[in-house]
Image (cartoon, helix red, strand yellow):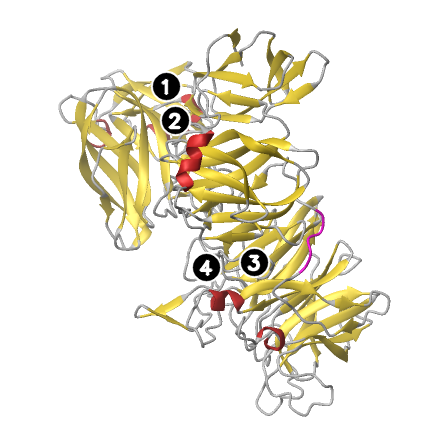
Amino acid sequence: MKRRILITSLLALVFCGGSFAANDAAKFFDGIRLTDSYKKLSNHNPLFTQRFGADPFAMIYNDEVFIYMTNDVLEYQNGTLIENSYSKINTINCVSSKDMVNWTDHGTMGVAGRNNNSYPAKWATCSWAPTACHKTVDGKEKFFLYFANNGSGIGVVTSDCPWGPWVDPIGKELVSRNTPNCGNVTWLFDPAVLVDDDGTGYIYFGGGVPQGQDANPGTARVAKLGRDFISIDGQAKTINPPYLFEDAGINKIAGKYIYSYCSNWNTGGNRYGFKNAEICYMTSNDPMGPFEYTGIAYENQGGFFNSNIYGDNGGNNHHAMFEFKGKWYMTYHARLLQNAMGICPGKNQNYRSTHVDYVNVNTVTGSITKSKGSAEGVAQVGSLNPFERTEAETIAWMAGIDTRYGGSNMIVTDIDKGDWIGVAGVDFGEGASLFSAYISANKEGAIKICKGKPDGDVIGYLPIPSTGGNFKEISAKLDVPISGKNDIFFIFSGDFEFDYWQFKESDVVLTASESIVSAPATISFEAKTSEAGIQKADLYLEGTLIGSSDKAPYTFEYEIEQPGTYNFQAVLTDGSGKTYETNIESVKARGPYEGIAQTIPGRLEVERYDVGGEGFAYQDESSVFESTKCTFRNDEGVDLDVTEEGDYVLGWTKKGEWLEYTINVDYDDTYNWVALVASGLDGSGFRLYIDGEAITEAIEVPNTDSWTNYASIKGKTSKLTAGKHTLRLSIEADYCNIDYIEFTAENHETSNVTETLADTPCQFNVYSLQGILLETVESTAEGMSNTLKEKNYANGTYIIKSQCNNFSQIILVK
């Protein structure tokens, strides 16, 4: 591939410090009141406050704690908030931390798919009480997430990543009432998994109290997992915890197997000394039991949160014990967040939040001393490195913001004036003087950076220009260089979205004239710094030197010829040989699929959306490729499917998603269009835009009774201008399938495939994608795919051009 690099003295258009000065950014905070937080700065519990989380389980992977939780969602009846029924919960939350205080939000993961077809476990209504583990399979780490489908069974989904996307490998329950020795278990739920030292997996589950059996419910079970971790090996065995209610836990400590559980609500007068809903434990020398009652591990949260300050008088307990960096912890849920939010004061609506505290474990004997929780939580382990990229959704404290899935990862959103985020124990070492953030904004705003507390000493401002709604790295020099270990707070003014941030030791900055381009394109760069004595600047692409300059200003040009993501970095060298690395400046280049722009008039095949990736060529709210049949572009983020006739279609669409296409419009004209669509719901639809301007009204897709029953709809565009453009297909309402959209010019004679060429044979030149004429074939345009297949053409994409008129089309042989 040919690339061109020029050393120039051009002044690059930059986003360094935005389009206005840092001292102007301070004005954005005049008169702003800080948003109140639901968590005090002296507290580390609950772990996060942007959503609820219950029934936590902890998994350790790569020196990081991952906590999986039931995603409690607020329920309303006739507009009034009501008690949590748990029946609406079909998602699972995941957060992780390397230091036990700063928690990264990995979002809400769809699991139970009976009422949401985009979620993997189609058979399940609910996803409660998750547990997770990982195992090396064929040399690659595999993650297993087990969950309860209410109280009727346990499922499993798998992934190559701790936070998904997840797939259902068996399409049914892993544990059901048909599982041997499970038919009479009152509640088939609350799984916990142990991976033993030899790699064998065991699953513990069950609960409920049959009438008259408070002292010995007999509803706990353990089963050995198959080697694949998605099957049961043999028969489940009964465990007999005294006064069991629910909530299985399992650990291996000092060679002993520790089974823990929550006691029930009728424990009065028991001989063991525990109270209602406390965490008790049993021990065994065998993972399959028998287990013997040993003691009390954790007090019910009502014992330490039932006060005028917290107002949590107890409720069911759900826990998991884990060891991390030499300390033992207990994660559990309580109702502090709902009470801090003022949800129905005086009532426990059972919207729960996750906490972590210490638990007293003797690692020599395997015994546990009764422990209790606190709002203060646990101390930080280590520190946060500000010189590494940190996700904006990594949070110790926050107020006002929310998070959402932004395509390839999570982003901070729903930002209002006065909202803020705090991170704890940020170790700047000898110092930092520059701050960078990856931001999307449609208008100007600012971030104020404080240390110690949200209204603490200001160390700098980041002016935020309008980025046109695209994410862009923005940098600013700190007003006050910072060193040592500090709590850092980002205070927001404006309406923007925030992906990640990073501090730098010096203000060495590389800026690009554009961050998103249509290939081919020439990009200008400038590397600059206030450091004295710089003698040379070198520009690198993906670590390969592509240019040098020994004269300030240090500017470069680079020609991008193909779609893709290009990561540039400059290294500046002073007279003593000391080097200074800039930020990595990413430029995303988009372009038509396989380098061929689609044409209007002609048929727009929706599956041939542009190359360029999430947020640039398309926006898809889920990273899961839903179809199990479609293999075309199934490694990208857009949900495609294949019909019985072999046509590729767009499916599983959600409002807010979009796809873009590089197109060539042949004539200045108004165009009639016909779209082949399907939907199993009322009210779904889409809209078309060219270069950001709507060319149609909102297009309603009719209910065709199923997503496989296709029908044609038609309409008209506004007047289009001839030339190269970007067409956006924007989903305006959920769940419509689209096969193609065909355009015909209203005032120019053009070949209409469906009306003219469909029934009229013609001579067509057949070309490869490289433009090589393969042969001339007589066929109809609509029948060309079958004609080429009969002539033994290899599966792939070809271009046909009619000798009868100016019609040309892309043909797929499959």
The answer to whether 642 appears left or right of 281 in the picture is left
> Which is in the foreground here, disc 3 or disc 4?
4
Mark 4: which secondary structure? Answer: loop
Residue 377's x, y, as percent? 64, 62
Q: CA distance from mark 3 to mark 2?
A: 39 Å
Q: Nearer the viewer, residue 360 or 459?
A: 459
Decide which of tag 4 and tag 2 comes sooner along the chain. Answer: 4
Identify whether 699 is placed above or below 689: below
Q: Residue at x 58, y 86 (%)?
A: 210
Q: CA distance from mark 1 to mark 3?
A: 45 Å
Name the residue carrying label 4: 113
Q: Position of residue 532 (x, y in %)?
A: 63, 16
Q: Spatial distance from mark 4 to mark 2, Cα to Cα? A: 41 Å
Residue lying furthest right: 364
- Report if the CB atoms under discs 2 and 1 are less than 8 Å apart: yes
Is residue 87 shown to the viewer in this render? yes
The quadrant in which the C terminus is found is top left
Which badge, 3 or 4, comes first in the chain's sequence?
Answer: 4
Which of the two discs, 1 and 3, sits closer to the camera?
3
Q: In the rendered image, which residue does mark 3 sit on? A: 170
* Gap in angstroms between the C-alphas marked 4 and 1: 45 Å
From the viewer's perspective, tell me whether residue 33 is left or right of residue 155.
Answer: left
Badge 3 or badge 2: first in the primary sequence: 3
Kindly state the secondary structure of the residue where label 2 is placed: helix
Residue 779: x %, y % from top left: 29, 24
**Three-letter code for the amino acid on which mark 2 is drawn:** Leu
Q: Are marks 4 and 2 in contact (CB under 8 Å)?
A: no
- The residue labelled by disc 1 is 766
Residue occupied by mark 2: 788
| Magenta residues (range) | 378-382
| Residue type (three-letter) at the residue carrying disc 1 | Val
